[in-house]
Image: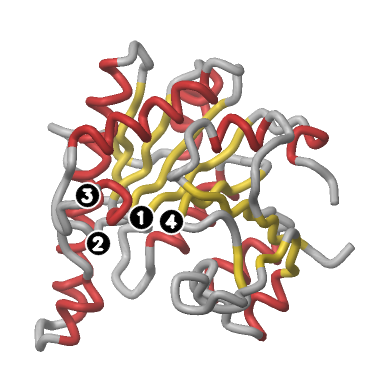
């Protein structure tokens, strides 16, 4: 398997869930956890890699769960999009405390707190070594932040999506429940879909496959994991076409 460092990634998108920001408290934002993730991003930024981010909103509100409890789905999804903006602003604050220039870019216009999404402007921010945090998903209900991440990574001509999770890669079954779970070093897009491996939703995987965009799944709990993978180290799974 080729190491990510062999590919000399110069522009990547980091996708993390909203739940990754809540630490052990079970809900909302945990500022020390946000700061820890910001430090991981900073360490990669120091390598000269252009970084953009998409953060979910499940720590505050998840549209699908709201819909399941009787709320109209479109309204619930818009509420979930607003939750992602709150998370993006929190990450922006932590990154700028580290001296990194950032832009929160929203798919829903809210000019007082974020820039509207304009592709050419976002690309220019990346070229100027600003971290772009894309918020509010795609701006459309019924699409997840997984799909938004893959869409933005494609539009920004990123060379890979890095998906930070609670485990160090993709397994054939839940390693928290099954001691014999097998971790993949590499797995194809089609196998992820056929085996329902829960890397990202099916629309996101199909979009990544159609655009030849690798997805690298790693653990956010491993200190220096994000930077380490870009240096050819660490444990991860890469999702790409079959060799």
Residue 158 against residue 212 in the figure, above or below: above
Q: From the viewer's perspective, is the residue at label 2 or at label 3 nearer?
A: 3
- Structural crowding at the residue carrying mark 4, measured as other residues with C-alpha within 10 Å and reported as few (<14), some (14–19) or many (≥20): some
Residue holding disc 4:
166
* Label 1 packing within 10 angstroms: few (<14), some (14-19), many (20+): many
The residue tagged 2 is 58
Q: Mark 2 or mark 1: which comes first in sequence?
A: 1
Marks 1 and 4: CB-CB under 8 Å? no
Q: Nearer the viewer, mark 1 or mark 4?
A: 4
Q: Which circle marks residue 145 in the picture?
A: none
How is the structure coloured here? secondary structure
Picture coordinates of residue 106, whole percent (x, y): 29, 44
Q: What whole-number distance in Å separates the C-alpha atoms at marks 3 and 4?
A: 12 Å
Q: Position of residue 166 (x, y in %)?
A: 43, 56
User: Tag 2 or tag 4, which sits nearer the N-term?
Assistant: 2
| Helix, strand or loop at mark 1 | loop
On screen, residue 113 above or below 144: above
Tell us which disc is closer to us: 1 or 3. Answer: 3
Callout 2–callout 1 Cβ contact below 8 Å: yes
């Amino acid at each position: 398997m080729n190491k990510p460092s062999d590919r000399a990634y110069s522009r990547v998108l980091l996708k993390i869930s909203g739940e990754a920001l809540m630490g052990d408290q079970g809900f909302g934002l945990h500022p020390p956890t946000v700061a820890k993730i910001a430090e991981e991003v900073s360490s990669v930024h120091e390598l000269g890699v252009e970084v953009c981010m998409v953060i979910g909103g499940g720590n505050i509100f998840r549209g699908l769960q709201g819909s399941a409890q009787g709320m109209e789905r479109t309204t619930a999804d818009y509420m979930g999009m607003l939750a992602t903006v709150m998370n993006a602003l929190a990450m922006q604050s932590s990154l700028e405390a580290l001296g990194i220039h950032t832009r929160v870019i929203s798919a829903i216009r809210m000019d007082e707190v974020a820039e509207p999404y304009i592709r050419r402007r976002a690309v220019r921010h990346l070229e100027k070594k600003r971290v772009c945090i894309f918020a509010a998903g795609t701006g459309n209900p019924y699409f997840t932040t997984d799909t938004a991440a893959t869409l933005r990574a494609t539009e920004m001509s990123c060379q890979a999506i890095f998906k930070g999770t609670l485990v160090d890669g993709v397994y054939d079954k839940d390693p928290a429940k099954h001691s014999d779970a097998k971790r993949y070093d590499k797995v194809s897009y089609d196998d992820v879909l056929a085996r329902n491996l829960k890397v990202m939703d099916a629309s996101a995987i199909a979009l990544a496959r159609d655009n030849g965009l690798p997805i690298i799944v790693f653990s956010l709990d491993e200190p220096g994991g994000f930077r380490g993978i870009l240096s050819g180290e660490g444990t991860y799974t890469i999702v790409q076409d079959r060799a």
